[in-house]
Image (spheres, grey):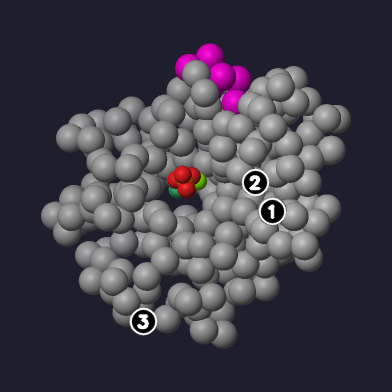
Amino acid sequence: MIAARIIGHRGASSLAPENTLAAIRAAANAGVLWVEIDVRLLGDGTAVVHHDETVERCTDGAGPLSRYDRMSIRWLDAGRWYGDEFAGERIPLLTEALFLIRKLDLGVNLELKAVSRAAARQLGAAVAGDLRAAAMPRERVLVSSFEPLALEASRERARSLLIGCLWSRLPLDWRQRAVALGAASIHCNWQFLTERTAHAVKAAGLELYCYTVNDSKAFLPYWRWGVDGIFTDRPQDFLLGGSPIGIG
Ligand code: G3P
Ligand code: MG
């Protein structure tokens, strides 16, 4: 298995402000072995961990990420919106997050988010560089994106990188697209997944990961379909003493 059964989504966003170092620590404390985090570029080309194109929802700042650079982004508080105890959290640089993930002995799914095709290529290249700088072990990293160009660009600079194709609903030609990218996994929205497609993905030799699963009971049948792992905001609901609950 590439990743893990239970993957903390945006760190563990039910336990700490999403995509912060605190959220990664919270996920590790909850017992997860892997986390998913979102990656975007600042205006100066620095890769950071953040979900939205703009900073309003998760910080005390305003405007698009592209208006910030690696110095000015430090002024934003990315924790207080979630709770006073998280005041002082920052939008992490990708390199900072990778160093923490390594220190905590976790694996990571980097979800690359880009605003344009050109930005996708730049992001893919930046991420490959940061992975090298952080000396992340190959088997602890899975890079995914809704944007194939970002995956191609990262693969060009890191040939052995493990790649996952990410879709909300799988397109009809999912298999050809996965082969073209040399993908090892398919990531999709569980609410659009059918049993038939799940079996087809597994029969194609690909791993299958679903987002964002927060209802452990509703998801039980999906495990039987062969789903390998889930992204969840609530890893505490899926793990008992570090072991996944109710998965045969
Ligand atoms: O990587 C899976 C999932 O995180 C994709 O959706 O919007 O939560 O980043 P989103
Ligand atoms: Mg994501």
- Mark 2 to mark 3 CA distance (whole Å): 33 Å
- Residue of label 1: 81
Residue at 80% from the left image edge and 56% from the top image edge: 87
Looking at the picture, how far across and down is residue 159, in whole percent? 54, 31
Amino acid type indicated by mark 3: Gly
Q: Which mark is residue 58?
A: 2
Amino acid type indicated by mark 2: Cys
Query: Looking at the image, is 212 positioned above or below residue 182?
Result: below
Contact flag, marks 3 and 1 (Cβ < 8 Å)? no
Looking at the picture, how far across and down is residue 199, in whole percent? 19, 56
Mark 1 crowdedness (10 Å alpha carbons): few <14, some 14-19, many ≥20: some
Report the quarter where the N terminus lies. bottom left
Query: Looking at the image, is 43 positioned above or below residue 226?
Result: above
- Mark 3 to mark 1 CA distance (whole Å): 34 Å
Tell me which segment is drawn in magenta: 117-123
Looking at the image, the residue that sits furthest to the top is 118
- Residue of label 3: 246
Amino acid type indicated by mark 1: Trp
Query: In the structure shown, which secondary structural element does the residue marked by tag 1 occupy?
Result: loop
Q: Quadrant of residue 217?
A: bottom left
Looking at the picture, how far across and down is residue 43, in whole percent? 70, 21
Contact flag, marks 2 and 1 (Cβ < 8 Å)? yes
